[in-house]
Amino acid sequence: MATSTGSFLDGRIVTAALPLAVGDVLVLALLLSLGTARHNGFAYLTENPVGLALTLLPFLVGWVVAAPLVGAYSAGAAESAKAAIPLGIRSWVVADVIGIVLRVVLPFDATGGLLPLAIFFGVTLVVGVVGLGVWRWLYFKLR
């Protein structure tokens, strides 16, 4: 049984999954940017890069923490869509929770009130699940 963190992560991250990792981050950044643009206009993306970064950061931090722990880049994820898609979706559920919590506890531009926050969580959850699922399916279909 592995006792060190390095040993645990060695089994959770394989180099063959690097294309998945790059694609996942790009897909999440794109979808979160589109959501930001939908609420603030597309000019916001270039006129307020700090605001955009503060929108993306909590969710990307959540992804960087959750994906390796859940196994989104494990050997199985790198081999087939059948393993990669559920692992990506499970990772996003955890990452989305982390992102929402970070937006609430840190000085990000969090939504006001419980109902808007719950709706925001639901939207980011569904958009991330669909986006990652489609991206990972396409990756294995076109590979």
Image: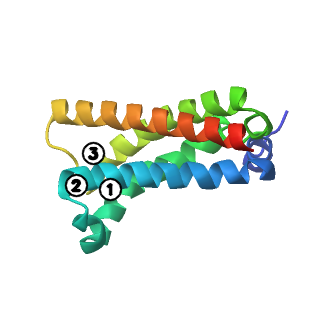
Q: Earlier in the sequence, mark 3 or mark 2?
A: 3
> Which residue corresponds to mark 3?
104
Q: Specify the amino acid type for callout 2.
A: Asp
Q: Is residue 61 visible?
A: no
Q: Earlier in the sequence, mark 1 or mark 3?
A: 1
Relative to 15, is 55 on the left or the right? left
| Label 2 CA crowd tier, 10 Å (few <14, some 14–19, many 20+) | few
Give whichever of 116, 138 is nearer the camera. Answer: 138
Give whichever of 5, 40 is nearer the camera. Answer: 40
Relative to 121, is 41 on the left or the right? left
Question: Could you say where residue 91 lies in the image, as x and y percent from the top left?
Answer: 56, 36
| Label 1 CA crowd tier, 10 Å (few <14, some 14–19, many 20+) | many
Q: Is residue 51 above or below residue 84?
A: below
Task: Residue lying at the far left in this picture: please name it.
Answer: 112
> Which residue corresponds to mark 1?
55
**Circle 3/circle 2 CB separation < 8 Å:** no
**Circle 2/circle 1 CB separation < 8 Å:** yes
Residue 109 is labelled as 2
Instruction: Name the residue rendered at 30%, 72% in the picture.
Output: 46
Instruction: Indicate which label's residue lies in the foreground, 2 or 1.
Output: 1
Instruction: Indicate which label's residue lies in the foreground, 1 or 3.
Output: 1
Q: Specify the amino acid type for callout 1.
A: Thr
Question: Could you say where residue 108 lies in the image, as x and y percent from the top left?
Answer: 27, 56
> Gap between marks 2 and 1, in whole Å?
8 Å
> Gap between marks 1 and 3, in whole Å?
12 Å
Instruction: Indicate which label's residue lies in the foreground, 3 or 2.
Output: 2
Task: Residue lying at the far front in this picture: please name it.
Answer: 142
Q: Earlier in the sequence, mark 2 or mark 1?
A: 1
Instruction: Name the residue rendered at 40%, 57% in the picture.
Output: 57
Locate the N terminus by quadrant.
Answer: top right
